[in-house]
Image (spheres, rainbow, N blue to C red):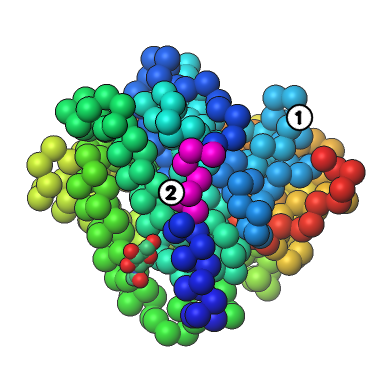
Amino acid sequence: MAALAAVFALAILTHCSAVMGRAAPAIPPSTTAKGPVTYVFGDSMSDVGNNNYFPMSLAKSNYPWYGIDYPNRKATGRFTNGKTIGDYMADKFGVPPPPPFLSLSLAGKDVLGGVNFASGGAGILNETGVYFVQYFSFDEQITCFETVKKAMIAKIGEEAAEATVNAALFQIGLGSNDYINNFLQPFMADGTTYTHDQFIRLLITTLDRQLKRLYGLGARKVVFNGLAPLGCIPSQRVRSTDGKCLSRVNDYALQFNAAAKNLLDGLNARLPGAQMALADTYSVVMELIDHPEKHGFTTAHTSCCNVDTEVGGLCLPNTRPCSDRSAFVFWDAYHTSDAANKVIAERLWAGMSAGHGGAPPVAPPRVGASVPAAAPSPAPSQDDY
Ligand SMILES: *[C@@H]1O[C@H](CO)[C@@H](O)[C@H](O)[C@H]1NC(C)=O
């Protein structure tokens, strides 16, 4: 397993730099955007198509029913039926969401705008997500950002590149997979190797090193999205005997969030110019789960496409989703629906404007609740696409 993982890691590492240059159709650069340049790091909650470029990735959603409520009913690689929380945040700014890193041409102007490095299956730890075979772990996402920065320097010079990065907003949504697809996964070693206290320490020391690395590359304004109540996502709820949220798992998320908050506060105190904040996605998502009807939903305990007990938990091409997709908080067994993402983005935005929710004195976050996790995707049937 370890040897296998090492091989994959190597394959992926080479991919990050090899990809530059032979880029796919360029998406218009976001340099024309009015909002701040935004760099997004994350997992399947924030992925806007990077994993589509990985031929061997098992964390993919570029098939129907994904995207059924996206413009043109298009499956883009987003792990929901419509837009992500980050997409809705970008709407608030009146800017296009940053394009996936793997769609960019590093030789062109693309490198001066925002970039989304998020990859379904990714975690804080390298070993998280190995069974998805191909994806960018957080460390690899940072390496890809480093590549972008080098290309920027080549284009506009060291000083201008540094100023752009210093002023940019770094949105990070990671950690869910370290629980869902690692610590809580019976066939992964970390859950038996570590106690939860030890595991949190491992996550936080790793995150500490990663955030310092980003700081070293010029990141100053950082919003880290706290974990959502992971014990309430359909794939966890089905593990309880009474269909209720797993309070033990929710406690893990709360403990992690508290430790992450401490870490960010410490970094702000020690690193000159650092403005790193935790976004309280836990409360926002919990409110939707506790009081769905207050926000226009009927159902928060199960997924719209009824895959809570399916291996993988992603919607299957041949299942029928619920008839009213906007009435469900959860789209699949991990990911919130388009309608929920809209409400979550609105509430996060309102929290920022009101001065709580932990945003730095920059702009609200682009990425959202770090709810989920990607799971191995079912093979899409040929005629689906
Ligand atoms: C994780 O992988 C990165 C390369 O992407 C490497 O630099 C780092 O040392 C690895 N971390 C651990 C703890 O092995």
Q: Residues within 10 Å of mark 2 (few under 14, many from 20)?
A: some
In the figure, 83 relative to 20: above or below? above
Of the two numbered discs 1 and 2 on the same chain, state the one appearing first in sequence: 2
Q: Amino acid at mark 2?
A: Ser
Q: CA separation, marks 1 and 2?
A: 32 Å
* Quadrant including the N terminus: bottom right
Q: Would residue 228 be seen by someone viewing this image from the given angle?
A: no
Instruction: Check if residue 251 falls in the magenta segment.
Output: no
Residue at 56% over, 44% down: 50
| Relative image position of residue 74 (x, y in whole percent) | 73, 32
Residue at horizontal 81 percent and vertical 51 percent from the top:
380
In the displayed structure, does residue 384 sit left or right of residue 378? Answer: right
Q: Main secondary structure of the magenta part?
A: helix
Q: Which residue is mark 1?
A: 73
Magenta-highlighted residues:
15-22
Pinpoint residue 350: horizontal percent, then vertical percent: 41, 27
> Would residue 374 be visible to someone looking at this image?
yes
Q: Determine which quarter of the picture holds residue 253.
A: bottom left
Q: Viewer-nearest of labels 1 and 2?
A: 2
Q: Mark 1, residues whose alpha carbon is within 10 Å: few (<14), some, or many (≥20)?
A: some
Q: Nearer the viewer, residue 90 or 303?
A: 90
271 on left or right of 313? left
Quadrant of the image where one finds ligand 1: bottom left
Which quadrant is home to the C terminus? top right
Q: Which mark is residue 359?
A: none
Question: Residue 150: x percent and y percent?
Answer: 30, 39
Q: Is residue 130 above or below residue 137?
A: below
Q: Quadrant of residue 40?
A: top left
**Residue type highlighted by circle 1:** Arg
Residue under numbered circle 2: 17
**x, y percentage for residue 352?**
35, 30
Q: Secondary structure at mark 2?
A: helix
